[in-house]
Structure formats: C-alpha cells, structure tokens
Image (spheres, grey):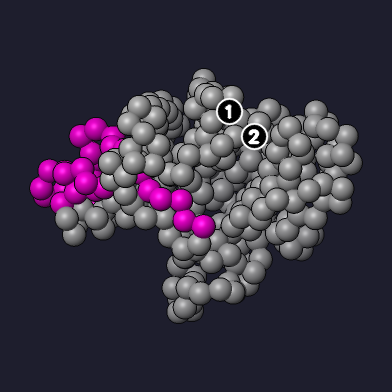
C-alpha cells in the first residue's frame, strides 16, 4: 500500500461541528463534550508540512491515553473507543479508530506548563544568554544537556501562531493568581517526576515536557495531549552525553531534511520525501512501543 493511503492529514466528519484545526488536532463540539481527532499532520519550525507521517496521530492519541490512565491525576479524557462515543460519532468509526478522544469540556489556563530536568532547547539558549531559564538562576559552567540539580518549572505563553515565549513565574501569577500559579507549578513538577521515573525504567530519559491544564467543574485538570514525542523530549539513556544534543524520539529527521534544502521556515510547508516520512513514523512507533510495552496496530 502506498504510504499516502495510510495518512490522515485532514478530518472531514459530516454531521459534526468542527470548531478548530490546530497544527495536529481537529476539534469537534458535541455539546456537552468535545471530540479531538489527532491527525497525521506534522509541523516543523511552526510550519505544517504538505504531507503527514503514517501512524503519527494514532501514536499521539494512544500514548496520551496510556499516560492519562497511568498518572492518577484529574484529566479530561472520557474514552478513546469510538464505539463508546455518541451515535453521530460512531458512524465515522473507521476514520476515528485509534486517533480520536472524547473529552470533557474545560476552560484552559492561558499558559503552557513546562518542566525541565535537563538543559536543552530554548532553556539552553536562555542559559547561554543570561545564566538563567525563565528567571531561575542556574549554576555556572553547565553544558548543553546537563542534568539539573532538580527539575524546574519554566512556563511559556500559548502562541496561536509562531513560537511560544518563555515567561517567568511572576507572569503566571499575573495571569491566574498566586494560589493557582503555585498549584500549576507543583502539579507540573510532580507529574514530570513520576513520568521521568517511569521512563527511566524503560531506558529513556525524559528531558523536558509541556502540559496544558484547564478547569473542569472548578477542578484543575490535565488536558490536551500528555507526554507524547510532540510535547516531550525523550532520549535513549545509552546515547546520552553531556555537551551534545542527544537523539530524540521526535521530528528530527524532518528538521534535518528541511535544513538540508534550506527551507525558509515560512508557509506553505513542502512535501516530505517518503523515506523521511517513513523514518519519522518509525521513531514515533518506537517511542510508543518502548513506553507502553505494546505494539500499535498499524
């Protein structure tokens, strides 16, 4: 079967009310609940590519399901099984299998809640420039990918377009109030520690991750995706070295390809060669297999 036949880059569900299309997810309003459809779209440098990555949406959806069940915290997931969803959804079961989630409606907080256990990515850039990350001063002499003495909470704005911007804790306080800001920080770090400890048992380092939270019936609730390769940086323990950016289970093949063709990092995104899409797909599937101990049906 040609690779393109296994890819869903855009959902079209007749009879359902589409309310948004993000970089990866399409969201439908079912009245009391929401239906999230995780497509195979992939973005790099904040630009969505013309074609998708086989099985990517299924990995993100089922891996989020795994973590929601594992973590033991309040979350918005109701079910990932189309046959347990309302009748108007079940008629689209063939399209939705493994890539859909019925969730409770939530009022999202206007911040990304990021936990970092290692100095990498934008945190490394901030540290090089200021010796701190999101206003948190760090010891001198740290290198790229250094493990931090303890995980830190480094929130960011939620950007509708372009990059999220790192912000300080005081800006979170301004946005949501001190008590809520402290709860978000503590919850973010506790979930990160639990997930990092689990990943360690699977031979993986969870370098950093971002969470989204919202209010459901007045309770702070974990929403969106959780601890997937799109929202988290996983490194193989046996390939970790301080001073380099270790290989991760994400879209690095895509980024490297775009750099090789000198992509201008502006829409529209190009079509990815089949071998790049296949290699990226294999990395997502490998992450799912390692973390859950199961093979994803493809």
> Which residue ends up furthest to the left in the rendered image?
140
**Tag of residue 255:** none
Q: Quadrant of the C terminus?
A: top right
Task: Read off the residue under disc 2.
Answer: 105
The reply to whether the magenta stretch includes residue 4 is no
Relative to residue 6, is residue 108 depicted above or below?
above
Q: Please give the name of the residue rendered at 67% of the width and 53% of the height, measured from the top-left corner.
A: 20
Relative to residue 45, is residue 247 depicted above or below?
above
Q: Please give the name of the residue rendered at 42% of the width and 55% of the height, measured from the top-left corner.
A: 164
**Element marked by disc 1:** strand
**Percent position of residue 5, x then y:** 78, 60
Q: Quadrant of the N terminus?
A: bottom right
Q: Badge 2 local density, few (<14 within 10 Å), some, or many (20+)?
A: many
- Compared across the picture, whether 249 is left or right of 15 comes to left
Q: Nearer the viewer, residue 112 or 199?
A: 112
First in sequence, mark 2 or 1: give its number: 2
**Tag of residue 216:** 1
Q: Nearer the viewer, residue 159 or 149?
A: 159
**Percent position of residue 271, x then y:** 63, 72
Looking at the image, do the residues carrying marks 2 and 1 touch, with CB atoms under 8 Å apart? Answer: yes
First to last magenta residue range: 131-160
Whole-angstrom CA distance, mark 2 to mark 1, is 7 Å
Relative to residue 10, is residue 266 depicted above or below?
below
Asked whether residue 90 appears in the rendered view, the answer is yes
Asked whether residue 98 appears in the rendered view, the answer is no
The reply to whether the magenta stretch includes residue 150 is yes
Q: Please give the name of the residue rendered at 60% of the width and 67% of the height, measured from the top-left corner.
A: 49
Relative to residue 266, is residue 285 depicted above or below?
above
């Amino acid at each position: 079967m040609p690779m393109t036949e296994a890819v869903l880059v855009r959902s079209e569900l007749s009879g359902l009310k589409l309310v948004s299309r993000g970089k990866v997810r399409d969201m439908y309003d079912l009245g009391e609940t929401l239906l999230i459809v995780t497509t195979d779209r992939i973005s790099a440098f904040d630009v969505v590519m013309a074609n998708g990555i086989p099985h990517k949406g299924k990995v993100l959806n089922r891996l989020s399901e795994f973590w929601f069940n594992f973590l033991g915290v309040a979350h918005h997931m109701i079910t990932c099984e189309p046959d347990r969803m309302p009748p108007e959804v079940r008629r689209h079961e063939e399209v939705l299998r493994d890539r859909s989630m019925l969730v409770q409606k939530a009022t999202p907080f206007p911040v990304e809640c990021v936990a970092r256990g290692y100095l990498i990515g934008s945190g490394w850039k901030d540290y090089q420039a200021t010796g701190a990350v999101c206003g948190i001063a760090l010891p001198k002499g740290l290198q790229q990918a250094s493990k931090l003495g303890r995980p830190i909470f480094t929130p960011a704005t939620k950007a509708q377009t372009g990059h999220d911007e790192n912000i300080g804790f005081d800006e979170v306080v301004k946005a949501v109030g001190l008590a809520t800001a402290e709860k978000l920080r503590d919850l973010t770090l506790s979930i990160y520690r639990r997930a990092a400890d689990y990943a360690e048992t699977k031979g993986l380092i969870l370098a950093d991750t971002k969470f989204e939270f919202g209010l459901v019936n007045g309770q702070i609730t974990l929403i969106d995706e959780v601890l997937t390769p799109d929202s988290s940086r996983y490194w193989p323990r046996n390939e970790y070295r301080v001073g380099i950016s270790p290989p991760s289970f994400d879209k690095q093949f895509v980024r490297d390809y775009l750099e090789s063709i000198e992509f201008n990092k502006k829409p529209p995104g190009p079509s990815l060669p089949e071998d790049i899409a296949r290699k990226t797909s294999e990395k997502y599937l490998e992450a799912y297999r390692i973390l859950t101990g199961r093979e994803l049906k493809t």
